[in-house]
Image: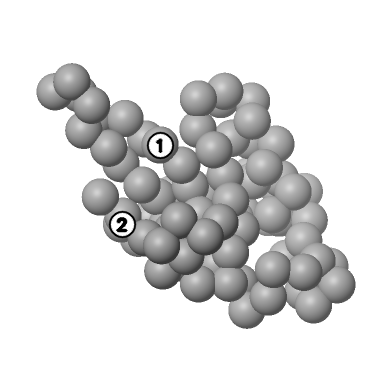
Amino acid sequence: MLFKLPDSFKIETPLGTYNPDWAVLLHIDGAEKLYFVLETKGTMRDIGRRMEENIKIECGRRHFAALGAVDYEVTDHWKRVKLGVI
């Protein structure tokens, strides 16, 4: 299930809080598992985004990498997830 993360879901960064856009929750063997978190931006290229956005994205990458079992992806449209294009 793809769902929009609530505004209350925040990651602390040196630039303030960061709220990723989407998450995918799967039901595996009767249990729910957060599979990955998705950030949507108008471009996939770092150079096309503001420096503040890139810093927060990097903080998101590090946050979810520290959790271990959750992937974090950046895309230009959430439908890429459904199409398996990421």
Considering only vertical position in the picture, is 10 above or below 27?
below
Residue 16 in the image: state x and y as whole percent: 68, 55
Inspect this view and state whether residue 46 appears. yes
On screen, residue 51 versus residue 17, left or right, reads right
Q: How many neighbours does mark 2 have within 10 angstroms: few (below 14), some (14-19), or many (20 or more)?
A: few
How many discs appear?
A: 2
Residue placed under numbered mark 1 in the picture? 35
Residue 65 in the image: state x and y as whole percent: 64, 30
Amino acid type for the residue under numbered disc 1: Tyr
Considering only vertical position in the picture, is 37 above or below 41?
above
Q: Which residue shows up at 62% across the image and 79% down it?
A: 42
Q: Quadrant of residue 30?
A: top left
Q: Quadrant of residue 22?
A: bottom left
The residue tagged with tag 2: helix, strand or loop? strand
Considering only vertical position in the picture, is 43 above or below 14?
below
Between marks 2 and 1, how big is the CA–CA gap? 12 Å
Q: Which residue is at the front of the view, 31 or 14?
A: 31
Residue placed under numbered mark 2 in the picture? 3
Q: Which residue shows up at 69% across the image and 68% down it?
A: 44
Mark 2 or mark 1: whose residue is earlier in sequence: 2
On screen, residue 43 versus residue 18, left or right, reads right
Inspect this view and state whether residue 21 appears. no
Q: Quadrant of residue 31?
A: top left
Q: Which residue shows up at 31% across the image and 55% down it?
A: 2
Q: Residue furthest left?
A: 30
On screen, residue 25 versus residue 41, left or right, reads left
Q: Which residue is at the front of the view, 80 or 11?
A: 80
The residue tagged with tag 1: helix, strand or loop? strand
Amino acid type for the residue under numbered disc 2: Phe
Q: Which residue shows up at 79% across the image and 77% down it?
A: 48
